[in-house]
Image (spheres, helix red, strand yellow):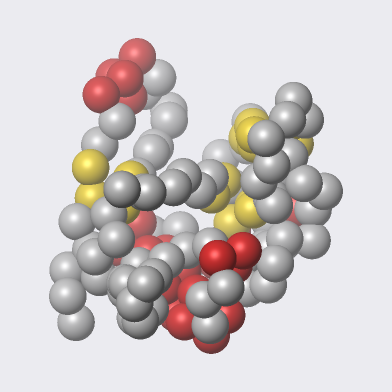
Amino acid sequence: METIPLFGAEQAARFPDLVAHHATRRGGVSAPPFDSLNLGFSTGDDPARVIENRERFAAVVGAPLDHWVVVGQVHGADVVAADAGMAGSGARVISELPPADAITVAEPGVFALALSADCP
């Protein structure tokens, strides 16, 4: 299995309780054009591969999928204030939460997934 490289956030030192992880496209199971660590369901990738990729990423960062909060990201101004009761929603299926532009988390142990594009 290929290693999933992670990069730390430069600003993390300003927020000692914040844990942030950033991945590249490497280390997953998705086939081209999604190769390989596609974490998004909205791309048209095989959902089983997206789940496998999320499970791999979860294992590397130490955040089990049942601790994840995922929204269907849209361009807008809506923010979901996530809590432990929302954890697991969207981790293995397209998000069960309302679409939003951002997620905030104030509870320890809740992992918010935000996706970004890596378009050339």
Taking 57 as reference, is 95 left or right? right
Q: Position of residue 44 (x, y in %)?
A: 57, 73
Taking 43 as reference, is 80 left or right? right
* Number of disc labels: 0
Q: Position of residue 118 (x, y in %)?
A: 36, 49
Quadrant placement of the N terminus: bottom left
Q: Is residue 6 above or below residue 26?
A: above
Query: Can see residue 53?
Result: yes
Q: Is residue 10 above or below residue 24?
A: above
Q: Residue at x 32, y 24 (%)?
A: 12
39 vs 69, nearest the viewer:
39
41 vs 15, nearest the viewer:
41
Query: Can see residue 55?
Result: no
Q: Residue at x 79, y 53 (%)?
A: 97
Q: Residue at x 29, y 30 (%)?
A: 9
- Answer with the quarter of the image where residue 8 lies: top left
Q: Is residue 47 above or below residue 65?
A: below
Q: Position of residue 74 (x, y in %)?
A: 69, 42
Q: Residue at x 31, y 72 (%)?
A: 36
Most extreme residue toward the front is: 120
Q: Is residue 84 above or below residue 90?
A: above
Taking 40 as reference, is 86 left or right? right
